[in-house]
Amino acid sequence: MLVPSITITNVRVIDLRFPTSREQIGSDAVNKDPDYSAAYCILETDSDLSGHGLTFTLGRGTDLVVAALKYLAANVQGRTLDSITSDLSGFYLQVTGDTQFRWLGPEKGVIHLACAALLNAVWDLYAKSEGKPVWKLLTDMTPEQIVAIIDFRYISDALTRDEALTILRDKQAGKAERLAQIEQTGYPAYTTSAGWFGFSDDKIRQLCREGLADGWTHFKLKVGGDAEDDLRRGRIVREVIGWDNRLMVDANQKWGVVQAIERTLQLAELKPWWMEEPTSPDDILGHARIRREAAPTRIATGEHCHNAVMFKQLLQAGAIDVCQIDSCRVAGIHENLAIILMAYKFGVPVCPHAGGVGLCEYVQHLSIFDFLCVSGALEDRVIEYVDHLHEHFVAPVTIKRGHYMVPQAAGYSGEILAESLERYSFPDGEVWK
């Protein structure tokens, strides 16, 4: 029996904002008053299915991404889903390569964030139409199909199409066994929820104790304030979690290169598993120097890395020990597939950023794909987890004993409840204070 074609009849774009700054949730040394927000779109169709996609923002400026997303929506309006999924690479290039709109990037900033939201919505609709979660949609594809999705134009000097095919083909063996493994144990995670910048000492102690009781073994602390205060707060975490559990520290781009080296060395007594975003996310050579001179502390970055080309250079320069992909900073799944494969070739583990609206829901799919089809390993690999805003999602993440459980619902897990969309939709034309 022929399956009726699905046509995208309308695209709704919503400016969505949660006032998280009131409770200092998400606070760090640079972003001290974040209101977790999203430019959100819904692909309405002539069927019972709809595709939901978002890109993460911090409050003011979400309207700019919304405006870009409305412009990009013309790429799907009136199209059949089949016309998109039959040439996913061509569709990606159409969305990211508008010859005039591209000038505002290219492939970075507001425009690329908007591309991610639209592409995430398309993947959500695609997966729902196949009755699969996105991770399964991807892992059921052949290596040839995966490679056909990726744009190798600017990265072939680091990873060729043939090299990507070889990696994917090699990992076909044992895929079923690996799936059975994580369906039983889940995918390892770490919590950032105990270490936000504005939390009191007592609250940090309490949250670390609660984390240990819930089975967490990896904790992240925000740093970048006064040097002695950072050390003092880090010692508090170590006193509670001990030395057998892992502690990561995150400066959120606070320092210049020289100061980042000094501060990373000062924090070395805490034995951090990694130092995250020590300096400007655009400073590739700076990261390389920090990695050399602040050893043995590992260096992690990626949540503000604009595109696959920047990840390529970070890897080529030996600038990072941990690759932190983001589901919305780059242009969605297409670009993240390229980054995951490059990281594997360079021997760098992928540990996604997930501090934001819907990012936990999204990146679990990417990490499962990485484990099943690319890396085949869980060692040194964790997904970030923050414990807020999940109650707004139709299919929120499930965490057990510090592990992401494999999602089963069809789609990309980013669909927000209708009542939450109505309550937290920001009126057009108003000013966010």
Image (cartoon, rainbow, N blue to C red):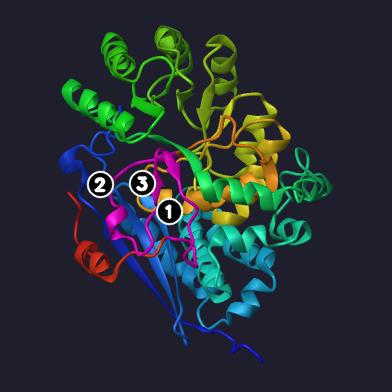
Q: Main secondary structure of the magenta part?
A: loop
In the displayed structure, would residue 224 be above or below residue 175? above
Q: Amino acid at mark 1?
A: Glu
Q: Nearer the viewer, residue 256 or 300?
A: 300
- Residue closest to the far bottom: 1
Write down the residue under mark 1.
361
Which residue is painted at 71% across and 46% down in the image? 154
Q: What amino acid is at disc 2? A: Asp
Q: Tell me where residue 247 appears, x and y as whole percent.
A: 41, 22
**Direction from residue 64 to residue 161 in the image, left or right:** right
Sequence-wise, the earlier of marks 3 and 2 is 2
State the count of labels: 3
* Quadrant in the picture for residue 355: top left
Q: Which residue is mark 2?
A: 35
For residue 100, say whether it is visible.
no
Q: CA distance from mark 2 to mark 1?
A: 18 Å
Residue 13 is situated, as x and y percent measured from the top left of the image, at 36, 69
Whether 142 is drawn above or below 352: the answer is below
Marks 1 and 3, the one that precedes in the sequence: 3
Disc 1 on helix, strand or loop?
helix
Label 2's element?
Answer: loop
Q: Is 398 contained in the magenta span?
A: yes
What residue span does the magenta drawing correspond to? 384-413
CA–CA distance in space, label 1 to label 3: 10 Å
Can you give x and y, in whole percent of width and height, for residue 24 in the image?
20, 37
Residue 210 falls inside the magenta stretch: no
Residue 21 image point, x, y percent: 20, 42
Which residue, given by chain and number where applicable, does mark 3 sit on?
Answer: 356
Q: Is residue 381 above or below residue 186?
A: above
